[in-house]
Image (spheres, rainbow, N blue to C red):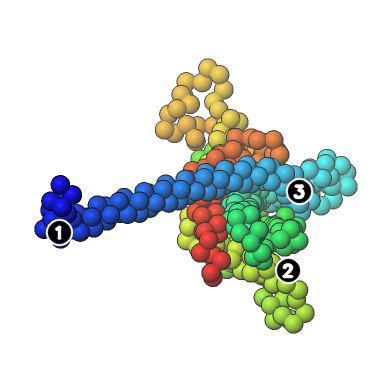
Amino acid sequence: MFSSAWNFVKRHKRKFIFAGAVVGGVYFLGKYAQKKIRELQEKEATEYIAQARRQFHFESNQRTCNMTVLSMLPPLKEAIVNQLNSESLTALLKTKEGLKTLFDLKTVLRRSGFTRTIVAVYSTCMLVVLLRVQLNIIGGYLYLDNSVGKNGTTALAPPDVQQQYLSSIQHLLGDGKLLCDPCTSSWFIILSLKQSLSLLELEQQLSWIRAEVEAGSQRSLSWFMLADDENALADQACGLTENDRMTIRLLNETRDMLDSPDFTTVLNACLNRGFSRLLDNLAEFFRPPPGDSAPSCAPDSLSAVSLPLAKIIPIINGQINTICSETPSHFVQDLLLNDQVKEFAANVYETFSAPQELQK
């Protein structure tokens, strides 16, 4: 029996070898497939966790952006008011000393009252978008530092560099007066305080002033947001510390973002919304009196009611308290919750939190 079995094996030796090879190959192929599937599942799980962590970090960074904007509004308001203090001029007009230079004081009052409100709208919009850029650049680098810093890689944004970089916002807060001249219009000077204006006329004049500021000025709006003196520091490279070089790199990257078409688009969207909200606030004071036959929703309702300039100036002056309010107002919320601002912030964060930046 054993002999017959051995003869059978010898006769079909090749078949047994082939079958063994097939079975062995299938076995090892199955093991290899299981290993690859397990590695793929582990990789997907790792990527999912990393993406979830990255999303959580981004959302936390946006909340920090919002809180930072609100904390910066009081000093911004103080800088504008100090530069364009129309309240002191109003008080001076009521005194006998003010009567000696009545014409000059009224002229300055007209200019400062309107100019500071326009400057407040521009400065607040620029503050919102600029901080979105800066804090998302920092946020992206911090994400990379937390991801790879433990492996000994040099930190991209150490605390000292962050502080030095973010202090550049003082150019907008401290030198916001630079925007006053482009926002000043001769239209304010020629008007009499007794002349009446409708909301439609105010809207037309604001549109004209915006065109002068944004298209007629020799400088772009980005010039008012970030100082341009870091290039001089770059020429003194031998005297710069490593932190100084990192800060200069961050500032140059920020300038690149400020000069991008996307930034211009987002800033224009904020300015459009900001001036629209300003007109909405002013419209409350131009409503027809109760019982008036002209419905407030009529197409010509914007020109139905006119107010003398002497009454409009205090209304305009008071708008800075809403525009630069540290408590979330409709004006500030419209800017912080703008979809284009959110999308732009996500793109900035995505750019600077991508691992490819390390290779650059």
Determine whether the residue tagged by mark 2 lies in a helix, strand or loop: helix
Q: CA distance from mark 2 to mark 1?
A: 80 Å
Please identify the residue farthest to the top as the structure is shown.
291
Task: Pick the quarter of the image with the C terminus.
Answer: bottom right
Q: The residue under label 2 is which amino acid type?
A: Asn
The vertical placement of 142 against 244, above or below, is: above
* Tag 3: amino acid: Pro
Residue 168 % position (x, y):
71, 61
Label placed on residue 353: none
Crowding around mark 1 (Cα neighbors within 10 Å: few <14, some 14 to 19, many 20+) is: few
Q: Pick the residue in front: 205 or 156.
A: 156
Residue mark closest to the camera, 3 vs 2: 2
Q: Farthest residue toward the right?
A: 97
Circle 1 is placed at which residue position? Answer: 10
Q: Work out how far the residue at label 3 is from the one at label 1, CA to CA, in angstroms.
A: 97 Å
Q: Foreground residue, 135 or 95?
A: 135
The residue beneath circle 3 is: 75
Is residue 196 visible to us here?
no
Q: Residue 316: name its quadrant.
A: top right
**Residue of label 2:** 243
Residue 61 drawn above or below residue 25: above
Give the image quarter of residue 331: top right
The residue shown at (55%, 57%) is: 353
* Labels 3 and 2: the sequence-earlier one: 3
Q: Name the element at disc 1.
A: helix
